[in-house]
Image (cartoon, rainbow, N blue to C red):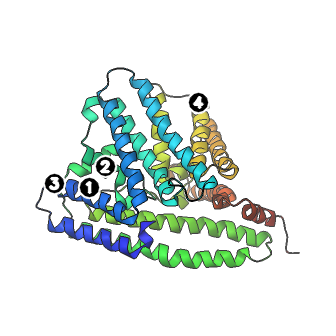
Amino acid sequence: MFYLNMNALLAMCGMVFVLMATRKWPQNKRILMLLFNVGFLFLWSGKLFTFYLIYTVVNYVMFVYLCRTPVWRKFSFALFILANIGAVVLFHMLGKNTEGSFLADGLMTLGLLFNVLKVIDALYFAYFFGKEGQVKLLDYVNYILFVPTFTSGPILKFRDFMADLKKPYRVDSAEFQFGVKRIILGLFKKVVVVVWMTDIFNIVMKQELHTHQSIFLMIWFYLLIYVDFSGYSDIAVGFGRLMGFTIPENFKKPFTSPTLTQFWRNWHATLGDWFRDHIFIFFSRKTPSKLMTAGLSILIMTLMGLWHGFSWLFLIYGVYHGVIIAIENLLGKTTVIRRKVSKPYFYFRCLLTQVLVVAAIIINMNDYDRVMRIYKGLFHLPF
């Protein structure tokens, strides 16, 4: 949530100019980014800084151990992953049941949701590459605490980030222009469009809901969360590029996805990629059957739902998407290639996919009373 704070924005802009001014120093990205990432968190919140200092060092020890140990590798690998998943569960529980606790902090919990996925990706890298995958502490800290993607993603892959970190800082005029435009676009979405759309949504919610109003709210909320989250992603991509890092795109034209399988490759793409990569990898030695793929689809989407929040609503949301994707797998309908089908058929499939998405998107509000009020409104005819 740093991007809504003027001091944070100025700090990131200042870091960009420092990197530009020291571009002839080969280590400027590694050393200066470390100072910036750590210093930023320290100035933002001493509690946040203390927690992440401990969390990062502990996970680095696990990472190094997994790189070096020749024994108990599978056991250690599983144990370290379960420990990080346990941390997420603990934070969700504290966030709901504890006030004023050292751990019950919204920003820490939000950051942990994304950073634990990066930690696990690094553990995978250490497990499969061993000593060849080991990196220095300062590089690991930069990966975990990279400020532009700290609270809202996109989710960085360990291998890609380390490759960028080793490259000298080279940002030419074209990349600078690209980065600035993405930041401006993201800020416009977040500060102007989202505020306006939220006001409209709240105005309609105060009315007595009939069928057409509930449908409007579901579609409007869908567009609202797209603008909101894509705005954050735009800013992260822009600042990442200005700092010399290639941040993966989180949204890849999701509205023209002809299947729900393809939709989740285009909507919050880095999250979907993460879950697919880290679950399917255990079945990579042989091609899974359609039935196994369908089952894995339900598992992945259920986990993605629970990742957003531990509630019945998010569980239902994940299972709903998982079941539909499983059906697409069983029927062999996971992909529609645009150039191989007629335009009417392609756009019909896109429309059908959007209808399926809109039908459940309102669950993302995670407010049972408001969600049920909107669904009940669907059956409340205005005549």
Q: CA distance from mark 2 to mark 3?
A: 15 Å
Q: Taking 56 as reference, is 183 above or below it?
A: below
Mark 3 or mark 4: which is in front? 3
User: Tag 4's secondary structure?
Assistant: helix
Say which label, 3 or 4, has the lower sequence index. 3
Say which label, 3 or 1, has the lower sequence index. 3
Q: Are marks 1 and 2 in contact (CB under 8 Å)?
A: yes
Residue at 26% x, 30% y: name it.
131
Number of residues whose C-alpha sits closer than 10 Å to that of mark 4, classed few (under 14), some (14–19) or many (20 or more)? some
Residue at 11% x, 59% y: name it.
25
**Residue 292's mark?**
4
Q: CA distance from mark 3 to mark 4?
A: 47 Å
User: Tag 3's secondary structure?
Assistant: loop
Residue linked to disc 3: 27
Residue linked to disc 1: 34
Q: Are marks 3 and 1 in contact (CB under 8 Å)?
A: no
Locate the C terminus and report the quarter of the image it occupies: bottom right
What amino acid type should be assigned to the residue bearing mark 4? Answer: Met
Q: Nearer the viewer, residue 111 or 339?
A: 111
Residue linked to disc 2: 141
What amino acid type should be assigned to the residue bearing mark 1? Answer: Leu
Residue 326: percent from the left, percent from the top?
63, 39
**Relative horizontal placement of residue 127, taking residue 275 as reference (left or right):** left
Q: Taking 138 as reference, is 227 above or below it?
A: below
Q: Quadrant of residue 12?
A: bottom left
Q: Nearer the viewer, residue 227 or 113?
A: 113
What amino acid type should be assigned to the residue bearing mark 2? Answer: Val
User: Tag 1's secondary structure?
Assistant: helix
Q: Quadrant of residue 13?
A: bottom left
Number of residues whose C-alpha sits closer than 10 Å to that of mark 3, classed few (under 14), some (14–19) or many (20 or more)? some
